[in-house]
Image: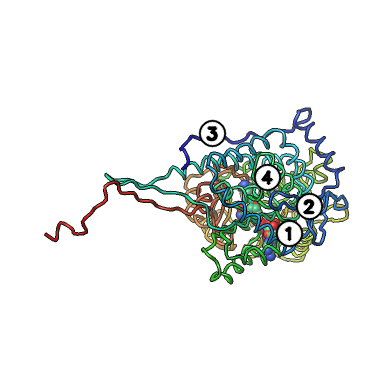
Amino acid sequence: MDAVTDVPVPANEPNLTHAPGTPERDALVAEIERQKSTEHEITQTIGGEQRPGVGELIPVVQPHDHGSVLGQLANATDLEVREAVGAARAAAPSWRAMSFDDRAAIFLRAADLLAGPWRSRINAATMLGQSKSVQQAEIDAACELIDFLRFNVAYARRLYAEQPLSTRGVWNRMELRPLEGFVVAITPFNFTAIAGNLPTAPALMGNVVVWKPSPTQTLAAWYFMRLLEEAGLPPGVINMVTGDGSAVSRAALTQPDLAGIHFTGSAGTFQHLWRVAGENIANYHSYPRIVGETGGKDFVVAHSSADPDVLRTALIRGAFEYQGQKCSAASRAYVPRSVWSAVRDDLVSEVESLTMGDVASDVSTFMGAVIDDRAFAKNAGALKRARDTDSISVLTGGGADDSVGYFVQPTVLECTDPEDEVFTAEYFGPILAVHVYDDDRYEQVLSQMADVAPYALTGAVIARDRAAIAKADSVLRFSAGNFYINDKPTGSIVGQQPFGGARASGTNDKAGSIFNLVRWASPRAIKESFVPPTDWRYPHMG
Ligand SMILES: NC(=O)c1ccc[n+]([C@@H]2O[C@H](COP(=O)([O-])OP(=O)(O)OC[C@H]3O[C@@H](n4cnc5c(N)ncnc54)[C@H](O)[C@@H]3O)[C@@H](O)[C@H]2O)c1
Ligand SMILES: N[C@@H](CCC=O)C(=O)O
């Protein structure tokens, strides 16, 4: 049985600025050059062994310069996925027998390695492979992932300490067992932190994992696997298979000992995974835990009392950082006419001043490219449709060019029809749709926009009038799992704003929180009677 020890009290990792002349910037630039000139063989990791993979090869490119290949990965075959499941099964007995302190120490060491010698490696891979600016890589691949690793240890300790009442002569205990079987973690392209958190959170709770990162995030994922090995993660606890995931659906999700799915990505993919689990429901030993955080159509609603500078900043940062490819990105805004007349021209000219380009060659760049040809086509199609729709005016942007990289201009659309697709569909790109309303229609606008999109992930109200804030808080109660007052709807911080949404946005299990970790444990209640009864009769029987 584990000793109950204290764990280090977590604190959020401070962001390094990477300002010109700082040591972190020099280290990062050198590491970017090293990775650019390396043809990475992006191996799978099965039972602690790095394997090149026998499936079809998929090039990993720089999205802002798609002719530059960073390495190749192989699309995992069904056999390789089955081997990864086998390696996880083989590792399970010794991993679950290991004390919590020993497991926790591995992930705390991983956090410290990432905060120190591995920081520039994982940041550089995220900038090159996912086209993140240095600021966006730092808050994600370094700080948020370090926070996930450290805070999860503290949350897990709290969960283990949560014990039932004991009465005189009876000791009641609760044991948090890992799930019986293995967990599949399937992760998105847009956050290296999420990719790292989804396999490590169940592993911390004593589970074994098969991890399938997104092809376009696999370079940073591959480096993170190496970091976990250096931190002392035993072979087979987390097995990484590469590729598009189709083999994982066929060969892992159908296994009788599938214990859970830990997913982040689009709503469509999540529904597919749930369907596969549903079709196999009678074959599983236990009901698999299904945790999925998915898409958003995140809003900013302004009241006539809004500070125009606060609104403009929230819109620019919220909509255009990382090219609008955050699930939390502001993609629809509702602005009263009086405020719009104060904000519109400055907003347009500031959006036109945003720099876009090769984020890895010029570290001062604000925006890079969208992730791949599929994302480019989706955004270019949405822009064409906007140009062709009478109720929409393109205020700035509207162009796209994939000749060198997958570049989509930061775009502001003004649309008179609040039911239009620009207010309901997730484009996952730098496109902000604005609906301008008469100032006295605030309450009607809140009611309309509360339910117009299928998602309920993030949203913000910008207002100085307290009653207006309270009204938005109440009408939009179920429209966002993360609600911001006078702030942008992006940039949640582990330990401060637990993240996730409901409706089509997911199961809202709040990544990086105690609510998420509880899903990866199977509690056992134990009652021990010290002086048990020896006569079955009760006093009322005389
Ligand atoms: N709510 C959140 O916390 C959150 C966070 C980040 C991203 N997202 C959402 O993720 C989406 C963007 O990420 P994406 O483009 O990587 O999503 P995606 O759904 O295309 O892919 C997610 C993962 O699923 C895999 N996958 C796809 N088809 C599969 C299949 N048939 N079987 C098994 N695996 C399969 C992909 O390879 C990838 O690893 C957006 O919708 C965004 O809103 C949500
Ligand atoms: N923590 C991030 C999550 C974004 C998801 O893609 C945010 O709040 O912006």
Tell me which numbered mark, 2 or 4, is placed earlier along the sequence: 4
Dot 2 falls on a residue whose secondary structure is loop
Q: Is residue 336 visible?
A: no
Relative placement, left or right, of 19 versus 292 is right
Figure quadrant, ligand 1: bottom right
Q: Which amino acid does label 1 sit on?
A: Ser
Q: What residue type is labelled 2?
A: Gln
> Looking at the picture, how far across and down is residue 522, in whole percent?
48, 54
Decide: is 135 above or below 429.
above
Q: Residue at x 60, y 37 (%)?
A: 108
Q: Mark 3 points at which residue?
A: 8
Tell me which numbered mark, 3 or 2, is placed earlier along the sequence: 3
Q: Can residue 261 be seen in this view?
A: yes
Tag of residue 317: 4
Tag of residue 80: none
> Looking at the picture, how far across and down is residue 67, in whole percent?
88, 52
Relative placement, left or right, of 337 versus 34 is left
Q: Residues within 10 Å of mark 2 (few under 14, many from 20)?
A: many
The residue nearer to you, when weighing 128 against 385, is 128
Q: Which residue lies furthest to the left in this view?
A: 542
Q: Mark 1 points at which residue?
A: 393
| Residues at marks 3 and 4 touching, judged by CB atoms closer than 8 Å | no
Dot 1 falls on a residue whose secondary structure is strand
